Amino acid sequence: MAEYALAPVEVPPVQTRHRRICTPLPVPQSLPLLRRLRAAELRAMAGQPPVVWDRAEGFQVSDRWGNTWIDWSSGVLITNAGHGRAELRDAVAEAVAQPLLSAYVFPHERRAALATRLQALAPDPDNYTVFVLTTGSEAVEAAIKLAKTYGLRRHGPAKRVVVSFRNAFHGRTMGAQLAGGMAAQHEWLAGEGATFVRVPFPDGFKNPDTSFDTFPAALAEAGVEPGEIAAVITESYQGVGPDFFPDEYAQALCAYAAEHDIVTIFDEVQSGFGRTGRMFAHQHYGVTPDLITCGKGITSSLPLAAVIGRRDIMDLYPPGSMTSTHSGYPAGVAAALANLDLIEREHLVERAQALGRTLLAELGSIVRPYAPALACLRGRGLVAGIQVMEPGTRIPDAATAAAITQACFRKGLLLFAPVGVAGECVKIAPPLVITEAALRESLAVFREACAEVLEGRRPAPEPAGR
């Protein structure tokens, strides 16, 4: 991922109900701050479009110089219930005013309320418990630790392998990246994690074979026996797509795991809390994970995460031996409770499902004229992604993906930098509170941006009656 240039460019002004662009971009007055950040922070932080966020409300992001964008990032799939909701701000303010800023793992009322609410979302609430943490990576690390401990204690030291999927992303800490499936992220690990094995993900594009037969075949090729496997970890959808399992594959995977007493970990950090039109994305497959990791959309705001899992796995460690300094900190828990109230009261799960039909249909009409450059469209609910490839190949075209994102930025539509193995995936994830009018307006902007970038071609006319 390259840094965005900081040379201001004159762009056509935009003034609509939902967007406003009234300055060159990046804004000249923002350059001292942007340069100060680049001088003071590590280089890795400089990969997003150069917008100095001043406020974000609902599905819009604004700077202090009069520009407003429709947001298709949700702050990287955080703000499911919308940016800056008054209900979330009020809940946090009430917690801070109590005053109670930190409680370590001493009990407090809000943490008890949240644990109960999350437990109620489990596949079998009576037999699942909750571990509240701070970040998604931390939740993934905890789940791996629990799963490996379960295998060790139930079956002995031979049951030690963690199986994950190629192209997966589970976070940026050591265990999370060992479980991840992107080779470039393993370079720094320098031989660590010999018990982590990766198999092909059945996405149907990068890996055309979507049958479950590929799973045991890949294990056999790696010399791994079923009795050696402690856990299988997977994103409920792979974020670099988003790529979903075929239902039959997911069900076969869980049946295989049950047969061999393998703990299944479904990573819902970016897919949970309504994003796909279900509370959790694994519910689309009709499967029951042993451990579920949560984060991002759990609060639509502050850092918070959780593991929801089978009681017999979660209770392997005695009191005081598996805690986290900021576990269940009051302000974050207050935000999570208010967020769950909003998701339920405003029917945001159902809203994502309904608006998702519009999103996928319109994106399909945008992609078709530009195939095979826009090579693969996938999505469900209010998350979608387009793989950008060099025409006639399966070679990722990161430059074109970035150009589309930049063209959108200059028109008042904000996406985060393209993701994927080579930065080829244009990821689309508006807050679940986006209105239908704003969604359609932003889709029209995206259509214009694709037409501009892809050799100046104009999109094909839509069929009559659309």
Image (cartoon, grey):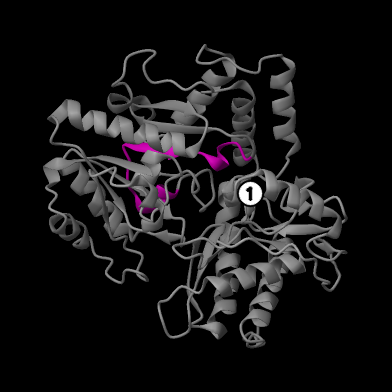
Q: In which quarter of the image is residue 383?
A: bottom right
Task: Examine the image and state in which quarter residue 221 appears.
Answer: bottom left
Q: Where is residue 306 in the image (x, y as percent from the top left)?
A: 47, 32
Which quadrant would the C terminus be assigned to in this image? bottom right
Range of magenta residues? 281-300
Q: Mark 1 points at which residue?
A: 75
Give, as a three-letter code, the residue at label 1.
Answer: Gly
| In front of the other: 330 or 345 | 330
Side of 340 relative to 433 (left or right): left
Query: Residue at coordinates 87% horizontally, 64% vertically from top-left?
Result: 23
Indicate the secondary structure of the residue bearing disc 1.
helix
The question of residue 291 being in magenta is answered with yes
| Residue 444 in view in this figure | yes
Query: Which percent across, then down, holds residue 271?
Result: 49, 49
- For residue 336, which quarter of the picture? top right
Relative placement, left or right, of 458 versus 401 is right
Asked whether residue 360 is drawn in magenta, I would say: no
Q: How crowded is mark 1: few (under 14 residues within 10 Å), some or many (20 or more)?
A: many
> Which of 182 and 451 lies nearest the eye of the viewer?
182
